Image: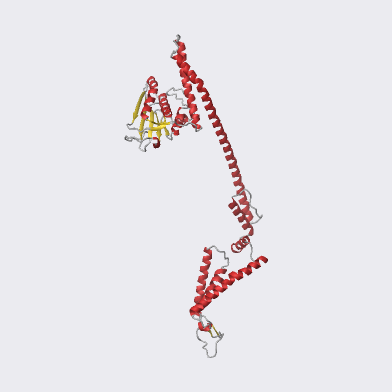
Amino acid sequence: HRMGPGRDRHQPGKDAVHGVAHAVSLDAAVLVGAVGGAVSLAAAELLERWRIDDAVNAVPVHLVAGIWGTIAVGVFADLALLGTGLSRSAQVGVQILGVGVAGLYAFSVGYVILRGLAELLPLRVTPQSEKTGLNVAEHGASSALLELLEAMHTQEQQGDFSSPVPIEPHTEAGTFGEQYNRVLHRFNKEVKKRERTAQALAEAKSEAELANATKSQFLANMSHELRTPLNAIIGFSEVIYKEVYGPINNDQYKEYIGDVLNSGRHLLGIVNDILDLSKIEANKLDLSEDDIAIGETVDECLRIVGGRALESEIRLDREISEGMPLVRADARALRQILLNLLSNALKFTPAGGRVIVQAVLEDDGRLAIAVADTGIGISRQEIETALAPFGQIADERSRYVPEGTGLGLPLTRALVELHGGTFVIDSKPGAGTCVTVRFPVERLLSAPGARQTAVA
């Protein structure tokens, strides 16, 4: 607004030199500028937080600061100099309306026009070119390095590291690429080596499983075929030995028949052990479970081995706690477990020794059955041998010569584990052996009786 006649050239908001009056005073202009800078910085921070790309901060400087400057005219301007005849609030409203109209044009009509022009003449580069250009301009990166990084990123996303990345020779990026390709080569070499190893192990495992299945099937068939003639041999030998159809006049013949009978029974026991172990390995041995009184089973087994203990001059004892619960188990398997442990204890205990069977209910509710002896004991290494199928131990101290097939303890442990129990051997050379079998709480029927201290 040009100054008219009679106006004071030294009033605030007027330029005395050029004769021009400003609608906003100097103080207000400084405030408007300060607020404009603040809102621009805030807008730039907001775009950064929203991850909106604006490399040169055009939006905060031009759009946000421009909106504030337009509205500030209505807030701080001298309304008389504006000459609109509007009140302060009305002028602010007009300024806001102007911002809205400009925005409507820019983001509707302007967008449509620019979109149409873009169909005829591309107005912007591809996102990849934009990314490359910004990295080159702002971070000093080279196009070769960016291509290398992009190739590495693609491998990471796809998980395919089988091919080397392309490189540009005699450049810094090329040096990085060569080293990366060497790492890839070593990595792929190790991967292929491990794949070959894994394949070989898988093939070996498959062959071992097939061989084991074949072995188990063979043993099962063989055992089944052997038991029929063995039962006949045992039956006929027993009839002859008992002289059912008349006396045997020759004592030597009767002695031989007794040897045949004992050998047949021994061989039948071995065949049954092999068959049972084969069934367990093939997961084909089904338990015929019943509620069993452990005290009665222990007494039955002690009577069976009593004659052998008497001949070997070994004392047999039992310690069964009162009020023991019934055990849900396979009766035949439980008898076999106890008989195998008792036979093993008698085998390794010299004359004058002692074998004791204990059964207690432990603090955690499990049933513990222990067979302990005062025999020669074995070392930790010998325990591993004894638990291996067909493993046998010869001991010079007791002059014990291995007999049988070495299936007693492996079969016993397998039968215990088939019941969900645990099998532990505690032994030291010269200090005897204690084998403890524990049955889980789930297999016990509640019964009154005090709990005892756990068996060692």
Residue 253, percent across and down?
A: 47, 11
Q: Is residue 355 at least partly visible in the picture?
A: no
Please, is residue 296 above or below residue 16 in the view? above
Please, is residue 47 above or below residue 418 in the view? below
Residue 125, percent across and down?
A: 64, 63
User: Which quadrant is home to the N terminus?
Assistant: bottom right
* For residue 454, side relative to residue 139 (left or right): left
Colour convention: secondary structure
Q: Is residue 370 at least partly visible in the picture?
A: yes
Which residue is situated farthest in the bottom direction here?
6
Please, is residue 30 above or below residue 405 in the view? below
Name the residue nearer the viewer: 329 or 194: 329
Which residue is situated farthest in the top direction here?
249
Name the residue nearer the viewer: 329 or 397: 329
Residue 315, percent across and down?
A: 36, 23
Number of marks present in the image shown: 0
The residue shown at (59%, 63%) is 138
User: Which quadrant is home to the C terminus?
Assistant: top left
Can you tell which quarter of the image residue 105 is in?
bottom right
Please, is residue 94 above or below residue 369 in the view? below
Name the residue nearer the viewer: 326 or 455: 326
Residue 69, percent across and down?
A: 53, 75
Name the residue nearer the viewer: 231 or 452: 231
